[in-house]
Amino acid sequence: MDPDHWTPAEKRIARRVFDAALDRELAQVMAEFKRRAAAATEPQEMRAVEKYLAQAGRDINAKYDYRYSVLEFVFARLLREGRIEASELQGLSDDRLERIRRMAMP
């Protein structure tokens, strides 16, 4: 099977998993941003908060790429980082799941 060919059912699963992982990571960044902003007591300390948020945004933009040609790599990384569970990917083809699992290995 062509790794770049995703069936309509796989596309629905992929979108659901991708969006859920992104939402969870954004929620984590937001919570950390609020914690850091609340802890800042001096105006100059807000620069560190700004720097954290900018870096988190760059990291998220680099990590979450929904092009089908790279989506297996994205899922492998998310799996390796613990941002998704293998069970969330159930319904993808066995070949695709195997490639993702192999890439996710350390």
Image (cartoon, rainbow, N blue to C red):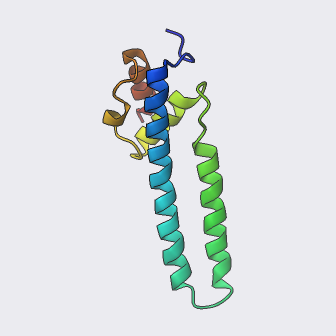
- Image location (x, y in percent) of residue 99: 44, 21
- Image location (x, y in percent) of residue 10: 45, 24
Q: Is residue 39 left or right of residue 45?
A: left
- Taking the view exactly as shown, the residue that stands out farthest to the left is 87
- Taking the view exactly as shown, the residue that stands out farthest to the bottom is 42
Image point 41% across, 39% down: which residue? 79
The answer to which of 100 and 64 lies nearer the viewer is 64
Q: Is residue 64 left or right of residue 11?
A: right
Q: Is residue 62 above or below residue 39?
A: above
Please tell me how many numbered marks the rendered image carries.
0
Image point 66% across, 54% down: which residue? 58
The C terminus appears in which quarter of the rendering?
top left
Q: Quadrant of residue 64?
A: top right
Q: Is residue 54 left or right of residue 39?
A: right
Q: Is residue 93 above or below residue 59?
A: above
Q: Is residue 46 above or below residue 56?
A: below
Image point 54% across, 30% down: which residue? 71
- Image location (x, y in percent) of residue 6: 52, 19
The answer to which of 55 and 23 lies nearer the viewer is 23
Image point 39% across, 21% down: which residue? 98
The answer to which of 45 and 24 lies nearer the viewer is 24
Q: Quadrant of residue 80?
A: top left
